[in-house]
Image (cartoon, coloured by chain):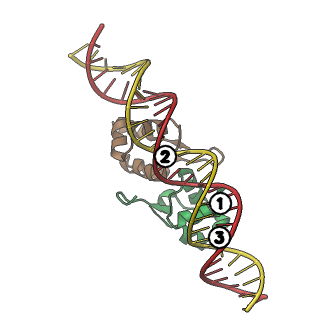
Chain colours: A green, B brown, C red, D yellow
DNA sequence: ACCTCATGTCAAACTCATTTTACATTCATA
DNA sequence: TATGAATGTAAAATGAGTTTGACATGAGGT
């Protein structure tokens, strides 16, 4: 599961901590997701997309077999 | 987190078990998600959307404060 | 009445997302 | 070069999603 969180976050000049704060999670969580350590929950995916002003489908790229 | 899985699944004349099979999960999982027992993982949300031929953003409706 | 299919549900076990705390690294900039 | 801000990372603990196996119900058809 690829995502473009880092690119969009930097475009909006937000730190990992600021984005995490808006989403109600810790900065470690945002960091882990940006570095593909694991996938966010569906709820967090929606919060990230909301605060980055994109859709979930735009923010994440899912490929079968490459989960 | 609301979803329209049941409605779209029935439109496509799929049983919970058939949809679960396509997505690689058990029917209990699909049943629990349709009945809002819990939310799917992000990966499963993408698989469900794929096999139901809609986007994740169309299939799930997220509301802040009503998570 | 019987059989089958679809669905609802439950408990135990397991995996994985998230938190907390803590420390290390990189980078800008005074 | 020193200081602070942003980031990377790691271990232990907790919480939530998923599986397995099982049992129960209702609808339809024979």
Residue that label 3 marks:
A15
Which chain contains the residue that carries disc 2?
Answer: B
Q: Which mark is on residue A53?
A: none
Are discs 2 and 3 both within one chain?
A: no
Query: Neighbour class for label 1 at 10 Å: few (<14), some, many (≥20)?
Result: some
Instruction: Tell me whether circle 2 and circle 3 mark residues in contact (CB < 8 Å).
Output: no
Residue that label 2 marks:
B40
Image quadrant holding the N terminus of chain A, namely bottom left
Q: Residue at x 67, y 66 (%)?
A: A17
Q: Residue at x 52, y 58 (%)?
A: A55
Q: Please, is residue D1 above or below residue B52 in the view? A: below
**Disc 3 versus disc 1: distance between alpha carbons?**
12 Å
Q: Is residue A52 visible?
A: no
Image quadrant holding the C terminus of chain A, namely bottom left
Which chain contains the residue that carries disc 3?
Answer: A
The kind of secondary structure element at disc 2 is: loop
The x, y position of residue B44, in whole percent, is: 44, 49
**Viewer-nearest residue: A53 or C14:** C14
Q: Please, is residue B51 above or below residue B37 in the view? A: below
Residue that label 1 marks:
A26
The x, y position of residue A51, in whole percent, is: 62, 60
**Viewer-nearest residue: A33 or A55:** A33
In the image, taking residue D19 as reference, residue A15 lies left or right, namely: right
Q: Please, is residue B8 above or below residue C16 in the view? A: above
**Disc 2 versus disc 3: distance between alpha carbons?**
28 Å
Query: Neighbour class for label 3 at 10 Å: few (<14), some, many (≥20)?
Result: some
Q: Residue at x 66, y 46 (%)?
A: B65
Q: Please, is residue D24 above or below residue A1 in the view? A: above
**Disc 2 versus disc 1: distance between alpha carbons?**
21 Å
Which chain contains the residue that carries disc 1?
Answer: A
Instruction: Tell me whether circle 2 and circle 1 mark residues in contact (CB < 8 Å).
Output: no
């Amino acid at each position: 599961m690829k995502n473009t969180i880092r690119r969009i976050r930097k475009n909006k000049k937000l730190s990992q901590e600021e984005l995490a704060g808006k989403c109600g999670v810790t900065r470690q969580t945002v960091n882990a997701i940006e570095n593909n350590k694991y996938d966010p929950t569906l709820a967090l995916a929606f919060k990230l997309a909301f605060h980055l002003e994109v859709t979930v489908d735009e923010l994440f790229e899912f490929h079968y077999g490459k989960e």
